[in-house]
Image (tube, helix red, strand yellow):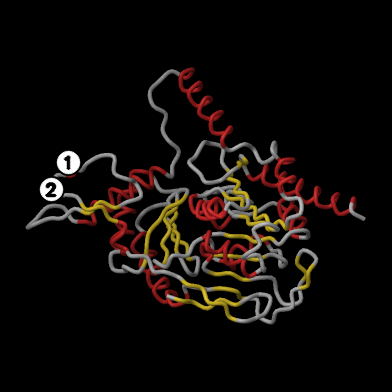
Amino acid sequence: MTVGCKDPKTGKMMKQSVRVSNPTLNFINVPTVRDPKLIPRGLPRNKHLKIESNGGGHLVREARVSTLLDSMRASSPARARPASAATRAASLDDEQKSWIQRHPSALSMFEQITRASVGKKIVMFLDYDGTLSPIVEDPDRAFMSDEMREAVRDTASFFPTAIVSGRCRDKVYSFVKLTELYYAGSHGMDIKGPPPGSRCNGNRMNNGESVLCQPASEFLPMIDEVYKTLVESTKSIPGAKVETNKFCLSVHFRCVDEKSWDDLAKQVKLVLSEYPKLKLTYGRKVLEIRPTIEWDKGKALEFLLEALGYANSNDDVLPIYIGDDRTDEDAFKVLRERGQGLGILVSKVPKETNASYSLQEPSEVMSFLRRLAEWKRKSLRASL
């Protein structure tokens, strides 16, 4: 389907093609299985196992729950296998070294990054949780430090800067509190630019409307309905928290005892079985419920580049995206496929990623942003 999104420069509507995902593509058909122990191993974890039954057998829902539990465990720290401390340490050290060679620190490679940006316009994209703020047990208390806010403000004074988060856009803004930024909430399904007349990286924004894009507006009543149902159905599970992000929902299980994960998975899948136009994904100790339209952080990145006038500027723009979560991989993948820009993963442990570089934690993100702003400041002084 086609949705309308507003161009921040001209105020005119821009057509964006959005394809609705086919839910059936998320299943793998296998022969009838009546005993869960006989389910073949080695199937992709991001697929659902479709168990067909003729007059009995197990419901498809049970297989979905089993796969969902695997995904929930995958988002948790892996348990160490029985082995000596020295053996484990050596194995982890080798893995870490190999991963760092493939995804070197953006701080240690800072000179190379700045050389790649010479003659190009840098555009910054930043995730929020785990990137600008630490991961905390209570998502309502994921506050960024004043020092980080100042680093982001300084960066935005030189480069167009966007916060791209799975959170509700208004919630992210309440944490960041910087009007000169672009905010893409709900995994990019709710994008808004700086208010009319504000100054952004030295350019005054004159467009009359600051709301840029909301491709999932028609899903709002459905999302609200599912939110209320999930709050009611999960209230008996201690530690479970359902968060509304306007165009998507988050079910946090960071504070849920692992013994209760099965119950939580069943409740979530039971509710979603009535809503085929919604899909379920997962992040770090969180289940994400989103519309089935093909729109994600990668699409949001592409839209913002186009809205800023850089759609066909492969040679004179350098997008830099920093994020820590699975959902940020959509943006990393876009940059890699375009052969343009840099993806930086925030992680202390090796992960499969499309990012080119890495940073270990938010404090390193802050150091990188500070160095980038200072480098630009010195470059401008030198050119005078």
In which quarter of the view is residue 164 placed?
bottom right
What amino acid is at disc 2? Arg
Tally of numbered discs? 2
Residue 364 located left or right of residue 103: right
Q: Quadrant of the C terminus?
A: bottom right
Residue visible at 66% across and 70% down? 193
In this view, which residue lies farthest toward the left?
A: 55
**Label 2 neighbour load within 10 Å: few <14, some 14-19, many 20+:** some
Residue visible at 15% across and 49% down? 31
Q: In front here: 384 or 107?
A: 384
> Where residue 241 sits in the image (x, y, percent)?
44, 57
Q: Secondary structure at mark 2?
A: loop
Q: In front here: 83 or 318?
A: 318
What amino acid is at disc 1? Leu
Residue at the spot of label 2: 34
Residue at the spot of label 1: 38
Residue 365 located left or right of residue 37: right
CB within 8 Å, label 1 to label 2: yes
Q: Is residue 213 above or below residue 96?
A: below
C-alpha gap between disc 1 and disc 2: 8 Å
> Where residue 126 sits in the image (x, y, percent)?
63, 55
> Where residue 299 sits in the image (x, y, percent)?
52, 63
In which quarter of the view is residue 107 placed?
top right
Q: Is residue 346 above or below residue 20?
A: above
Q: Which mark is residue 129?
A: none
Residue visible at 60% across and 62% down? 172
Answer yes or no: is residue 191 visible: yes
Q: Quadrant of the N terminus?
A: bottom left
Q: Is residue 76 above or below residue 287?
A: above
